[in-house]
Amino acid sequence: MTGAGTTGKRRAIQRGVGVALWRQIADDIRGGLAAGTLAGAEGRLPPEAALAERFGVNRHTVRAAIAALAHEGVLHPVHGRGTFARRQKRLVYPIGERTRFSTGLGSQARERHTDIFAGVQESASTEIAKALGLEAGSKVIRVEARGSADGVPVSRATSWFDAQRFPTIAEAYADAGSLSAALRKFGVEDYLRASTRIEARHADEADARDLRLSPGAVVIVTHAINVDMKGDPFQYSRTRFPADRVELVVESQGKTTVD
């Protein structure tokens, strides 16, 4: 039987599959920490030599994985003592009929802030047009935003809105600091989540930069459609959450699927 803090049997690391060995090891370490089967007393990881044996790689590859996780804030190397898991409680973010970043974190964070990176008019793809009930090629406003809690990035969202109905939504969002407040300027007093699709993947280069993650970190992605109180869709969004920082809790009565 394998207990916490032991290396256990050798883990299968796949070579020649286009995913760096250190990245696979980092993912395995994340999983072991989440399951409580890897770190021992005080959250200490096994020595590098033991991890190298566990994964069948050299110590340099293990160091690369540890360095990546330390950059993310998952691990904390202490000179002369070893490498420790940071005891960070993940934020719980509810996915419900009235999903709102401004209130979803509740008392879990002292400060919540949203940065608007861009507001660009573009032509809607087939997917976006279908989600918004528009003709393909219709003009939409793409808004890029990042949500932070106590100074730590916890979400990165790309949203699309009908340009005819919300021509200055990006500016209104940036001024108000809240999407709900910005929407009220366009007559949307309240809105509901119509559907949410959830998947997990590795962060791409842009998300790793904006969310301050190391290459290969896992993000949870939600594809969501919001509707006004008449049932008309007005926002389609793709939001990325760092899996090590945020836990999604689905409580929506709308349609939710998990890939």
Image (cartoon, rainbow, N blue to C red):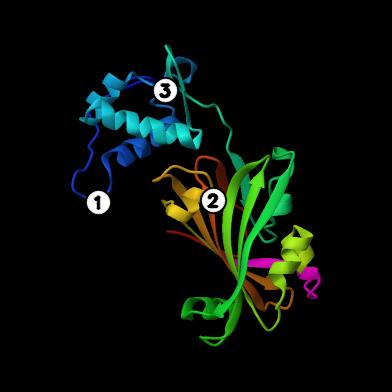
Q: Which residue is mark 2?
A: 210
- Give coordinates of residue 160: x percent, y percent: 59, 72
* Residues at marks 3 and 1, CA–CA distance in whole angstroms: 28 Å
One can see residue 34 in this view: no
One can see residue 33 in this view: yes
Looking at the image, residue 41 lies above or below residue 164: above
In this picture, residue 221 sits left or right of residue 102 = left
Give, as a single range, the part of the protein colored magenta: 183-195
Secondary element under disc 1, as helix, strand or loop, is loop
Task: Name the residue: 67% across, 79% down.
Answer: 232
- Give coordinates of residue 65: x percent, y percent: 35, 34
* Residues at marks 2 and 1, CA–CA distance in whole angstroms: 24 Å
Closer to the N terminus: mark 3 or mark 2? 3
| Res 150 quadrant in image | top right
Closer to the N terminus: mark 3 or mark 1? 1
Looking at the image, residue 110 lies above or below residue 94: above
Q: Nearer the viewer, mark 2 or mark 1?
A: 2
Looking at the image, residue 230 lies above or below residue 115: below
Q: Label 3 crowding class (10 Å Cα cut-off): few <14, some 14-19, many 20+?
A: many
Residue found farthest to the bottom: 135
Q: Nearer the viewer, mark 3 or mark 1?
A: 1
* Residues at marks 3 and 2, CA–CA distance in whole angstroms: 29 Å
Residue closest to the eye, 71 or 93: 71
Task: Name the residue: 78% across, 61% down.
Answer: 176
As drawn, the label of residue 39 is 3
| Res 185 quadrant in image | bottom right
Secondary element under disc 3, as helix, strand or loop, is loop
Q: Which residue is mark 1?
A: 18
**Residue 226 painted magenta:** no
Amino acid type at circle 1 is Gly
Closer to the N terminus: mark 2 or mark 1? 1
